[in-house]
Amino acid sequence: MKCESCNEREATIHISKGNGFEKTEKFLCEQCANASFENDFSYPDDTFNIQKLLKSLSEHPSLQQTKRRPKQCGTCGSTINTIVQMGKFGCPDCYATFGSQAADIISRVQAHQSEHVGKMPVKSRAHLKTRKKLEQLRGRLEKLVETQEFEEAAIVRDEIKALEEAGDNDGI
Amino acid sequence: MMEYSHISPWMQDVEELPVEMSTRVRLARNVSHLPFPYMMKDNDGLEPVLRKLETALDGYRRVEMDDLQFEDKALLVEKHLVSPLFTKRGLLSYISEDESVSIMVNEEDHLRIQTMGVGLPMIDLYRKADAIDDMLESEVDYAFDEKYGYLTACPTNVGTGLRASVMLHLPALTFGSRIQTLAANLSRFGFTLRGIYGEGSVPLGHIYQLSNQLTLGQTEEEIINNLDELKERIVEEEMEMRSWLESEHLLEVKDSVYRSYGLLKHAYRMPLKEAAKCLSDLKLGTDLKLIEHEDFQFQKWIQLIQPAFIKMRLNEKDKEITSLEHAVEEERAALMRQLLGGE
């Protein structure tokens, strides 16, 4: 189907306009559709201009995202923009809030290193140990169930339960 | 603040080495779920932490930035007890009696633990900071992440939060212009070598600071061992360059050493830059055994000629001053004459 306006290009956009009393329909190519948004189809009352919105969507598919309110850190109110501007995070929680972007920044300033291998606070050491042990036990439990060794599996399950109850349960 | 107008006890009576000077280690630590200092609206969130520090750091002197005059702050900076940034925005610092330990509260991070020493293995200084860190950790809930380690305001400190540095006196490498290539090579390994006093192309007194740039992906011990190794190599290069100077340019070296000695001993006005250059020449001459002066201690004297130190001496004299700049230069020259037994 050819474009109703230029009669040259293929019509790719179907525009339907109605105000409750009458309805008009047009089949246009992209160029003519864009041009028509500016001229023919603008409402006199400009509070919510659907044409402009449509036009901007057809031209900038990404605009919708950038116009959305940027993500903010719940603890300190930083956004990724303020962080990049200052070259600093706003609080320790920003590292988790801006997960992949934080990882990107860190990798860039730390010569592509991404993992801490040094000292750990004693509290975290105990926490990590419990978590590693739990991971190990859960893996074993899965295998035991697979091989139908239920008696042994019950013992492991109890061990897991005991560890979960003894340790601080947050996120283990 | 007069008690800080002397050379730090840890720096007194140390055996001076050629090239290698003092060493510093600092750990950056933060309190969990609390905005970093530059984002803090007030210090209320820090109050419980401060109360705990107060008891944990019994025996340390508590120095509040708000209580200090400009000159007192400058003095602390010249002694490396606090950073220039800290004098503007910091809250308070805990300083040990021998001034080898300083714990800054609200520098760029909530806590900066710093240890200093001279002639000590760097790993010992780290162990000292590490022990203080352990002690504070039992009181304060640190911001720590299993993946990224200790979380810091600036991503350049994340991980170990460790910055280790050593000051090096490199007159021969500066003279031979080898220093730029060396600095460029070091930066590729994640280390920096830069002048410590002053800006400009030639740092004051030919004194440089070698430090690690990366804080993630290596253990504290690895960082320090690498830094130690690089330091040894730079010391070797400097010594090689000095032998070359001695064999090829002995007269020129001797000439500049004795010229500088003459200036220090007899001048009546000494700008900082000139004094530092002369002291550097005197140190090189001493190391090469071209000149001898019993009381000469490079590190101490370099500190004594800094503006805030000179200003303190002036204040003690209670003299009428018309031009501060001239008065400082005159006092610096007077100090040098006195130290070297001139007129």
Image (cartoon, coloured by chain):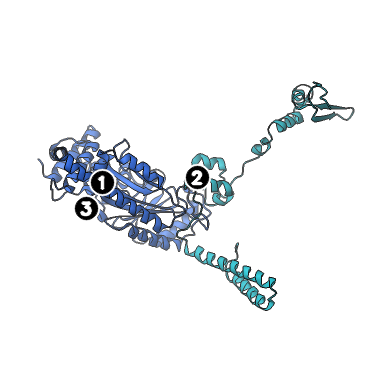
Chain colours: A cyan, B blue
The tally of labels here is 3
Residue placed at 20% from the left, 36% from the top?
Answer: B270
Q: Can you identify the residue that label 1 sits on?
A: B238
Q: Residue at x 22, y 32 (%)?
A: B322
Q: Secondary structure at mark 3?
A: loop
- In the image: residue A161, left or right of residue B307: right
- Is disc 2 on the same chain as disc 1? no
Residue B293 shown left or right of residue B42 in the figure: left
Q: Amino acid at mark 1?
A: Glu
Query: In the rendering, at what x and y percent does residue A74 appear?
Result: 59, 49
Given residues B67 and A134, the one toward you in this image is: A134
Question: Residue B308: x and y, percent?
Answer: 27, 42
Name the amino acid, label 2: Arg
Write down the residue under mark 3.
Answer: B16
The x and y percentages for residue A111 are 47, 47
Residue B83 visible from this viewpoint = yes
**For the residues marked 3 and 1, what is the alpha-carbon distance in whole angstroms?**
16 Å
Q: Do the residues indicated by labels 3 and 1 lie within the same chain of the protein? A: yes
Q: Amino acid at mark 3?
A: Glu
Q: Is residue B24 visible?
A: no
Which of pointers 3 and 1 lies earlier in the amino acid sequence?
A: 3
**How dense is the environment of label 2, judged by Cα within 10 Å: few (below 14), some, or many (20 and up)?**
some
Q: Which residue is mark 2?
A: A108
Letter of the chain that mark 1 sits on in the rendering: B
Q: Kindly state the secondary structure of the residue where label 2 is placed.
A: helix
Answer above or below: position of B227 versus B198. below
Q: Are marks 1 and 2 in contact (CB under 8 Å)?
A: no
